[in-house]
Amino acid sequence: MDWGMSNRISRMIKPTTGRSVMLACDHGYFMGPTRKLENPRETIDPLIPYADTLAVTRGVLRTSVDPKWDTPILLRVSGGASILKEDLSDEEITTSMREALRLNAAAVAISIFVGTPHEKQSLVNLSRLVDEGEDYGMPVMAITAVGKELEKRDAKYLALACRLGAEIGARIVKTYYCENFSKVANGSPVPLVVAGGPKLNTETDVFNLVHNALDEGAVGVDMGRNIWQNDHPVAMIKAIRSIVHEKATVKEAVDIFNENKKAGAHGR
Ligand code: 5RP
């Protein structure tokens, strides 16, 4: 692997543990002002010290992220559909590689919509982005998006979608956790991180998801709503970090969450 590519990946997936806590704040690109991400700077600011990578669009990066922070940026470069559309799969590449380089992105991210009306378009978009990314040493993350069909999140579908993303050349794939996740992880020759999806009922549910995903082969999380829609987002991300980087158990993560919640952890 070229030095630039390798260096960018090492900035996101920490070589000390081989793992990563990515903070996903890119939802606005199709969902608009998502609950508790209405003002991105307010959401991101307290959490950034605990994120190994921040996932945003260029609009949020320019307006709401201080360029003096040194957290690596995972730049969302696909879009073109809004939550108002029934079919969210009609995406194109919305941000050029030149722009990603100008913004000093550590990686670019694009959704693929396997099994949808725009499957081919999204896979060809990925392949073009990978061709350009490889030219410049820019890792591409493929995101196995399911649009509104959350029930698609099973091992058979996700294993297929992740493998397609890796075969086309993504250096990292973001997917969902599911039952039999090891089947998904075993079928992917590149590292996988998991999203959290819509907010789960309890913190323990989130910690179980993270713990099981790592146990079954993920290298980390790229998580949003289950962190910043929680009433105690800093306590949440610190507890998740303990699982990802310190191999904490779910019980230990709950204790870390409660201690930080009690202490009113506010980040920066
Ligand atoms: C938005 C995304 C999100 O980054 C991804 O879904 C992770 O966020 P969450 O944990 O809230 O699901 O790709 O399209």
Image (cartoon, rainbow, N blue to C red):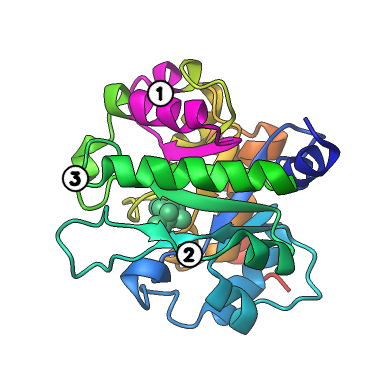
Mark 3 is on which residue type?
Pro
Would you say 9 lies left or right of 4 here?
left
Pinpoint residue 205: horizontal percent, then vertical percent. 39, 42
Compute the Cα span from label 3 to label 1.
Answer: 26 Å
The correct choice, above or below, for 216 with respect to 208 in the image is above
The reply, left or right, for residue 133 in relation to residue 79 is: right
Which quarter of the rendered image does ligand 1 occupy?
Answer: bottom left
Q: Amino acid at mark 1?
A: Phe
**Residue 218 x, y percent position in the rendering:** 54, 30
Q: Residues within 10 Å of mark 3 (few under 14, many from 20)?
A: few
Query: Seen in the image, is 157 located left or right of residue 255?
Result: left
Which of the pair 254/95 is nearer the observer? 95
Q: Which residue is mark 3?
A: 117
Q: Which residue is mark 2?
A: 26
Dot 2 beta carbon under 8 Å from ligand 1: yes
Boundaries of the magenta span: 158-184
Q: Residues within 10 Å of mark 1 (few under 14, many from 20)?
A: many
Select label 2 or label 1 by which is in front: 2
Q: Considering only order in the chain, which callout, 2 or 3, is on the residue closer to the N terminus?
A: 2
Which residue lies under the disc numbered 1? Answer: 181
